[in-house]
């Protein structure tokens, strides 16, 4: 939900916010020839997220091909690979470790 708290000078208040578990997808991304997909950016496509939030949580693939992608409270989403800002085909991804993907 949304809301606000107004605090007058010298007073204090408290706000309770619900917390959701943070889901992450971890794995490796390789190019079709087998080389690590170093530098490819992985942008999560979570339907409820505005573009600004998706940009904040976009991950960059490490030199060895490893990545860690935040999915927020979602256990699965689609991810948009960006290779030198060129959009490649999105693919599904789920929260969890040890996932291996190959770019077309």
Image: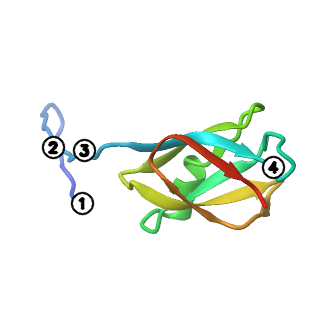
Report the front residue among 7 and 50: 50
**Which numbered marker is on residue 19?**
3
The image shows residue 63, relative to residue 57, as above or below, that is: above
How far is mark 4 from mark 3, CA to CA? 37 Å
Report the residue marked by disc 4: 31
- Name the outermost residue toward the right: 33
Q: Residues within 10 Å of mark 3 (few under 14, many from 20)?
A: few
4 or 2: mark nearer the eye: 4
4 or 3: mark nearer the eye: 4
Report the residue marked by disc 2: 16
How far is mark 4 from mark 2, CA to CA? 45 Å
Whether residues under marks 3 and 1 lie with C-beta atoms below 8 angstroms apart, the answer is no
**Residue at x 76% of width, y 47% of height:** 40
Q: Secondary structure at mark 2?
A: loop
Q: Secondary structure at mark 4?
A: loop
**Residue at x 35% of width, y 51% of height:** 73
The mark nearer the N terminus, 2 or 1, is 1
Instruction: Give the left or right position of residue 37, taking residue 42 as reference.
Output: right
Q: Secondary structure at mark 1?
A: loop
The image shows residue 65, relative to residue 103, as above or below, that is: above
**Residue at x 70% of width, y 45% of height:** 29
Report the front residue among 101 and 13: 101
Q: Residues within 10 Å of mark 1 (few under 14, many from 20)?
A: few
Report the residue marked by disc 1: 2
Instruction: Give the left or right position of residue 9, taking residue 87 as reference.
Output: left
Q: Residues within 10 Å of mark 4 (few under 14, many from 20)?
A: some
Q: Quadrant of the C terminus?
A: bottom right
Q: Position of residue 81 (x, y in %)?
A: 70, 57
Q: Secondary structure at mark 3?
A: loop
The mark nearer the N terminus, 4 or 1, is 1
The mark nearer the N terminus, 4 or 3, is 3
């Amino acid at each position: 939900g949304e809301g606000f708290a107004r605090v007058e000078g010298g007073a204090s208040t408290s706000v309770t916010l619900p917390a959701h578990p943070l889901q992450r997808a971890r794995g490796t991304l390789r190019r079709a020839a087998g080389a690590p997909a170093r530098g490819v950016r992985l942008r999560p496509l979570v339907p409820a997220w505005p573009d600004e939030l998706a940009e904040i949580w976009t991950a960059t693939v490490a030199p060895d091909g490893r990545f860690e992608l935040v999915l927020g409270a979602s256990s699965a989403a689609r991810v948009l690979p960006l290779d030198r800002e060129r959009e490649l085909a999105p693919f599904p991804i789920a929260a969890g470790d040890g996932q291996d993907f190959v770019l077309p």
